[in-house]
Amino acid sequence: MRTLLNNLAKCVLAGALVWVGVGPAHAADAAASAPVKLQGLRGGTPLNQDNPPAGNRQERDHGPADRDFVQQPPLIPHTVSGYQITRNYNKCMDCHAWQKTKASGATKVSVTHFRTRDGQELDNISPRRYFCTQCHVPQTDAKPLVDNTFQRARGLQ
């Protein structure tokens, strides 16, 4: 009889512990299933519609900006509105091609832009580096989309 009571007491205790453990877990599940208001960068615009462009403006032409990390592609320090970069024509090369930089005063295209992915040196811009605005972007006065604590690389400060 005593063994039966001990077993019964153990079962009641185990049941109580399970019930106590389930209580907070159940409360956490209820809180997790409560509706959460999320605000995306699209501002509630449905995915099948375009967002109107933000009211940002490009900065006026000025000297090159400092870089924030070591391998950062230089920012474009002038407007590129209306610039055309197609398979057959690249407006950037009107000033940045090596043979035109003296007359234009623009920075020469880096020698790295003349190498293929296999390391072969070409005598013209490599196709993988031809579309400048894939890496280089104009400077702008836009506010950051999200708060952040980004700091420039220590060696560049």
Image: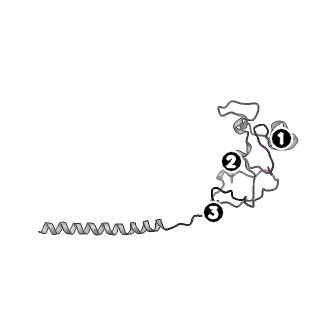
| Residue indicated by mark 1 | 94
Whole-percent x, y for residue 17 in the image: 30, 67
Residue at image position (76%, 33%) is: 124
Of all residues shown, which one is farthest toward the right?
103
| Residue indicated by mark 3 | 44
Residue stretch in magenta:
76-89
From what the image shows, is residue 23 above or below residue 53?
below
Q: Please tell me whether the stretch drawn in magenta is mainly helix, strand or loop.
A: loop
| Residue indicated by mark 2 | 72
Left or right of 34? Residue 156 is right
Decide which of 81, 61 is in the foreground and name it: 81
Q: Earlier in the sequence, mark 3 or mark 1?
A: 3
Residue at image position (64%, 55%) is: 48
Distance CA(mark 3)–CA(mark 1): 41 Å
Left or right of 7? Residue 113 is right
Q: Earlier in the sequence, mark 3 or mark 2?
A: 3
Residue at image position (79%, 56%) is: 59
Of all residues shown, which one is farthest toward the front?
48
From what the image shows, is residue 133 above or below residue 42?
above
Decide which of 36, 16 is in the foreground and name it: 36
In the image, what residue type sits under mark 2? Answer: Gln
